[in-house]
Image (cartoon, helix red, strand yellow):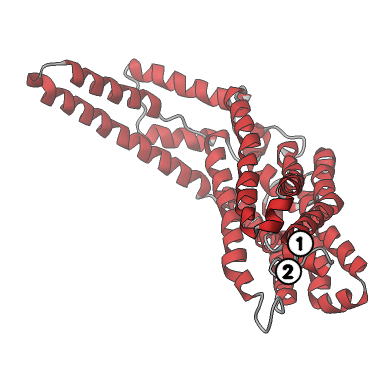
Amino acid sequence: MSAVFACQGFGNLAASIVAIVVLACFKSAIREDVFMLDYVWRICLGFGAIPGGITLYWRLTMPESKSFQAEANKRAAAGADAEAGALPDTENEMLLTKNNNIQTPLDEQLAESSRNASNLGALVNDKYAGSINHIAENADATEQPTKTARLETFGQYFGQWKNMKVLLGTSLAWFVVDVAFYGINLNSSVVISAIGFSGDVQSGDPYDVLTRNCLGNIIINVLGSVPGYWISVFTIEKLGRKWIQLMGFAALTVLYVVIGFAYHKILDASNVAFIVLFTLAQLFQNFGPNVTCFVWPGEVFPTRFKATAHGISAASGKLGAIVAQAGLMTLKDRGGPNEFIPHLIEIFALFTLVGFFVTFWIPESKGKTIEEITGETD
């Protein structure tokens, strides 16, 4: 999973390269009419759909994991029992979850029954339509208790603090890292300007300004982001998820404190020092919680709840991005253009400090099977 996520670094790098190439193709047109940039950004956006389409094909054709196949087999077995008249009730669902941390509802079998009933209703005389609809309604009514049982088992599993704290740990960690990650990266133009790779599009040459902006992004990615991703890939099984995330949050807290409280002093003294500090922050974002927050939730939850729990964790991260961009970053011009940026970086340090402590709620998954981590049994 870490290698998959690390491709994000190559994607960021490729985006800047594609932008430079497209800008070069429209160089003369842009200098004659700045509104030609409308075509540039649309073409760049369209190129982003290409790797997405390729990835979608590979995902649809790749085999499912062994744990997912085992879960599917359990559901198939439950369907066979249902056909024999052994439909488990809510109490049996709850007991199965209690003993096995997992349960096998009959949603697929019941849904199939409902579809069969509906299809049959389309074939018979109107005289019998009412009876067939009644059968379909009964099938839907039978399905409801099973759906209720699924919700109850989800609530029962995460109702235990030992399980809930893991979900809180993965969700809060992803939330706080994305507050900092998107807070800085969605406003990288501020940093690019600080290191001298920006300019004013309106007063300068739009082509030159945007090209330099892309070059600044490439520098940031090559120096910090891409190496950070791949250091994580090659060390995650040796160092462990917890160690990398703790180290990353600790390093980010220190770096954000230094950059935030000494922002103007560093820039006045040396642009190189600022670039080094910012690059280190990019490095430890990715050789740290930005990678582990994606990988960890896919390993520490039972197969039955894994997709939902990972989705909750990921949604928490996107909430962090919203808080950063729609909330905190609206303050960046308080007191003047970009004057509040140092204080925002100080706030990001507080968020990463919170991430450091909630990491202790998540169990280490290095070298362990899903059964060992979650207590699932066959």
Q: Is residue 140 left or right of 11 when viewed as pictured?
A: left
Going 84% across and 54% down the picture, which residue do you hit?
219
Residue type, label 1: Val
Q: What residue does disc 1 label?
A: 209
Going 73% across and 47% down the picture, which residue do you hit?
12
Q: Is residue 282 visible?
A: yes
Residue type, label 2: Asp
Counting residues from the start of the chain, the first of labels 1 and 2 encountered is: 2
* Count of marks, rendered view: 2
Q: Is residue 209 above or below residue 29?
A: below
Q: Position of residue 167 (x, y in %)?
A: 59, 50
Secondary-structure class at tag 2: loop
Residue 148: quadrant of the picture: top left
Task: Name the quarter where the C terminus is drawn.
Answer: top right
**In front: 34, or 270?**
34
**In front: 136, or 47?**
47
State if disc 2 and disc 1 touch (CB < 8 Å). Answer: yes
Q: Which mark is residue 42?
A: none
Q: Badge 2 local density, few (<14 within 10 Å), some, or many (20+)?
A: few
Q: Which mark is residue 200?
A: 2
Going 27% across and 32% down the picture, which residue do you hit?
140
Q: Is residue 118 above or below residue 91?
A: above
Residue 52: quadrant of the picture: top right
Q: Position of residue 362 (x, y in %)?
A: 68, 50
Q: Position of residue 168 (x, y in %)?
A: 59, 54
Q: Badge 1 local density, few (<14 within 10 Å), some, or many (20+)?
A: some
Q: Position of residue 10 (x, y in %)?
A: 76, 42
